[in-house]
Image (cartoon, rainbow, N blue to C red):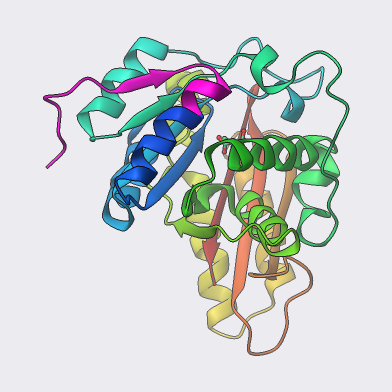
Amino acid sequence: MPDTAFPLTRVTTVASLQSAVAGFREDGARIAFVPTMGALHEGHLALVRHAKTRADKVVVSIFVNPLQFAPTEDLDRYPRNEAGDIALLQSVGCDLVYLPTVDVLYPQGFVSRIEMKGPALGLETDFRPQFFSGVATVVMKLFNQVRPDLAVFGEKDFQQLAVVRAMVRDFDLGIDIVGYPTMREADGLALSSRNAYLSPEQRAAAPKLHAALEAIRSVVLAGGDAEVAIATAKADLTAAGFGQIDYIALRDAETLGEVRAGKPRRLLAALWLGKTRLIDNIAV
Ligand code: PAF
């Protein structure tokens, strides 16, 4: 049961974060970390609950990372609800929340970037070229500040999970990266902070994305042609009112490159509904 009798400890500076984590370490605690951009929903809480089952102490960061937004993207519009987020974190027994400002993470003179190839190529990068450099840079910083034993990421951002795994492997960070299955509404829509932007009509149409991915999977598993099934799904989604389809692609689940015989596959999609960009993915 979450311990709600004690207030959740909040820290905003690297020194106070590291002092709190050192206190956990002195007690011999195994530490799990869940990085977030706030606007927490049940999907994030599931990550924290899972982290609690894998470690003694759970640290959550809330930081809307400007490096992963393009100038044209929704950085200023990104939902923020610090008080609500803290109450939710307390309700699931989070031990420490780290709330750095932009100046704390990127002080004046900060000039470094992590640039990756491999799973960072294609898909999201074709449409958001700066995205994984921004994600990898902030995750590397947060990992170095928190120094957790393990970190939990949602499979909803499947390419991000693959990028973080590759970074941890390549830089010998020694952090166990745990992927947690996507949480969905009863109608199949993947939980996302951006769902808050959908109008009632768009919200009613949104689950068709997951249904379309399921339909493609059925065709592929029955031995049908993936490209034909994807083309059919794209036409159905357009007819259902979706806007630009950035991609729907069947990829190798580990490398996110071309599918390999006998290896797990992942079907990934990103598309627009009005001014909101939705992403989703499923195992095939
Ligand atoms: O998935 C997210 O919320 C963000 O990309 C992350 C991992 C917190 C980095 O800013």
Q: Is residue 206 visible?
A: no
Farthest front residue?
Answer: 26
Measured as percent of width and height from the top left, residue 78 is found at 58, 17
Indicate the quadrant containing the C terminus: top left, top right, bottom left or bottom right.
Answer: bottom right
At 75% from the left and 16% from the top, the residue drawn is: 107
**Quadrant location, ligand no. 1:** top right
Measured as percent of width and height from the top left, residue 113 is found at 84, 37
At 68% from the left and 42% from the top, the residue drawn is: 140
Give the quadrant of residue 102: top right
The question of residue 12 being in magenta is answered with yes
Residue range of the region highlighted in magenta in the rendering? 1-17
Q: Nearer the viewer, residue 220 or 281?
A: 281
Q: Is residue 209 visible?
A: yes
**In the rendered image, the vertical position of residue 104 relative to residue 284, given as above or below:** above
Measured as percent of width and height from the top left, residue 36 is found at 51, 32
Q: Nearer the viewer, residue 119 or 95?
A: 95
